[in-house]
Image: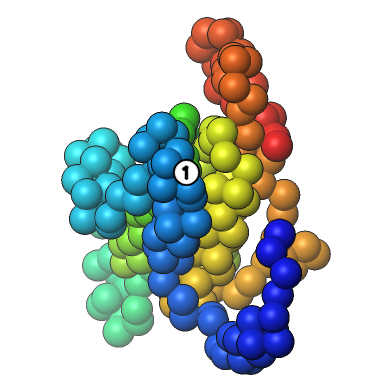
């Protein structure tokens, strides 16, 4: 680490006094790229990928397929809610009372089970970047996943289901592998800052005890060593989750 001058320390102190809560975390990719030795940058294949380019992958691979699945689930919930309500709606409306399906109604319970199953699918969804760099792809993928869950909560509530208190998606949904230790640490920071910023923007409280949990799904791969356990199927996915730096 180079020796810091008085001017350097002053600049750091001034920067530390600023409010960084609304920082665009994608800037970390630029910081990582510019911090590399130019002679080694091309050798490592390190290049910052902008948000628009990453979104061209996320949209057809993640966002659209999941939204299509949710649309089918929502249609099934809507059909069950119609069966749940149609038998008693007339009696309630005739008395001038508002109507909501009873939690004891079989069709209502089935609708709730469908929604819980959908949330379980989102909770267990995994986004893997085997050369994650500073984590921009993982951050944007997680953001898209959380947007989808948030949308499904709002639409499920509009269909008459109870609103869940918190989200099931979070940093546990992303998996990263990276050679460069500095880039890997930036990826951790980016994912956590992005998670907290998203929660603030959408009115969700921070989780506590702890606020931040270890990002064990990130692996710093040593050159010449295999990155992944060559186990197939479900066991392989579980082994990925256990990887840590």
Q: Is residue 93 above or below residue 150?
A: below
* Image location of residue 200, percent across then percent down: 51, 77
Q: Which residue position holds label 1? A: 133
Q: Is residue 242 visible?
A: yes
Q: Is residue 159 visible?
A: no
In the rendered structure, the answer to whether residue 42 lies left or right of residue 237 reads left
217 or 42, nearer to the observer: 42
Q: Is residue 79 above or below residue 204?
A: above
* Figure coloring: rainbow
85 or 149, nearer to the observer: 149
* Image location of residue 88, percent across then percent down: 32, 61
**Residue at coordinates 35% horizontally, 45% vertically from top-left?**
47
In the rendered structure, the answer to whether residue 137 lies left or right of residue 57 reads right
In the rendered structure, the answer to whether residue 13 lies left or right of residue 130 reads right
Which corner quadrant of the image does residue 192 belong to?
bottom right
* Image location of residue 173, percent across then percent down: 52, 43
Q: Is residue 144 above or below residue 128?
A: below
161 or 36, nearer to the observer: 36
**Residue at coordinates 63% horizontally, 71% vertically from top-left?**
206
Q: Residues within 10 Å of mark 1 (few under 14, many from 20)?
A: many
**Quadrant (top left/top right/bottom left/bottom right) for the N terminus:** bottom right
**Residue at coordinates 71% horizontally, 87% vertically from top-left?**
6
3 or 128, nearer to the observer: 3
Tell how many labels: 1
**Residue at coordinates 70% horizontally, 75% vertically from top-left?**
4
The kind of secondary structure element at disc 1 is loop
**Quadrant (top left/top right/bottom left/bottom right) for the C terminus:** top right
């Amino acid at each position: 680490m180079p020796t810091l001058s008085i001017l350097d320390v002053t600049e750091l102190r001034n920067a530390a006094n600023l409010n960084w809560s609304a920082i665009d975390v994608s800037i970390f990719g630029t910081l990582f790229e510019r911090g590399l030795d130019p002679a080694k940058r091309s050798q490592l294949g390190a290049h910052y990928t902008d948000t628009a380019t990453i979104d061209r992958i996320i949209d057809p691979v993640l966002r659209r397929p999941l939204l299509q699945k949710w649309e089918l689930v929502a249609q099934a919930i809507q059909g069950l809610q119609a069966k749940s309500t149609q038998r008693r709606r007339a009696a309630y409306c005739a008395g001038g009372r508002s109507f909501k399906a009873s939690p004891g109604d079989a069709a209502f319970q089935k609708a709730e089970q469908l929604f819980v199953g959908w949330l379980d699918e989102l909770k267990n969804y995994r986004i893997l970047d085997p050369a994650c760099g500073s984590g921009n792809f993982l951050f944007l993928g997680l953001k898209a996943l959380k947007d989808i869950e948030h949308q499904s909560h709002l639409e499920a509530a509009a269909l008459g289901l109870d609103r869940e208190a918190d989200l099931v998606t979070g940093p546990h949904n992303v998996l990263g592998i990276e050679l460069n230790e500095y880039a890997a640490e930036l990826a951790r920071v980016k994912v956590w800052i992005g998670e907290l910023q998203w929660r603030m923007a959408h009115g969700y409280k921070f989780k506590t005890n702890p606020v931040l949990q270890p990002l064990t799904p990130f692996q710093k791969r040593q050159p010449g060593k295999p990155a992944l356990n060559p186990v197939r199927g479900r066991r392989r996915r579980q082994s990925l989750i256990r990887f840590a730096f």
